[in-house]
Image (tube, rainbow, N blue to C red):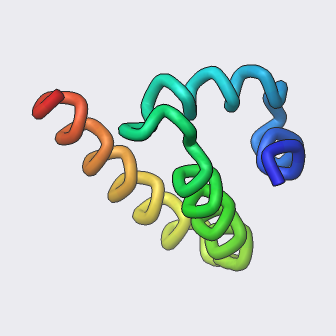
Amino acid sequence: MLDEIARALNVTTALISEQVEADSPDGGGTSVLTEASALLQAFVKISDPEARRRCLDFVGDVAAREQVRG
């Protein structure tokens, strides 16, 4: 599953693996990968570019708030 996500994002598996382990509250990252995979699968089904942009904006905003709360 991690390899599929990496290919879809055009990054290395190692890059994703390092980030997931660093960001995961439990250190394992399994649930984070499952959720990321589900998010990616849903995202690629969106054909409207404006809807994709709104989706990315939303996720980016939530991630930024999480980083501030740290």
From the viewer's perspective, is residue 16 above or below residue 65? above
Task: Judge from the rendering whether residue 14 lies leftward or rightward of residue 19; answer left or right.
Answer: right
Which one is nearer the viewer's eye here, 27 or 16?
Answer: 27
- Identify the residue at horizontal 68%, vertical 31% (top origin): 16
Name which quarter of the figure residue 12 lies in: top right
Left or right of 43, for residue 67: left
Q: Which quadrant is home to the N terminus? A: bottom right
* Percent x, y of residue 9: 76, 41
Whole-percent x, y for residue 7 in the image: 88, 43
- The answer to which quarter of the image holds residue 40 is bottom right
Q: Which residue occupies 83% across, 35% down?
A: 10
Which image quarter holds the C terminus? top left
Q: Is residue 48 above or below residue 23?
A: below
From the viewer's perspective, is 14 left or right of 67? right
Up the image or down, 51 lies above or below 2; here it is below
Residue 34: image location, x then y, percent: 63, 61
Quarter-of-image position of residue 17? top right
The image shows residue 35 at horizontal and vertical percentages of: 56, 62
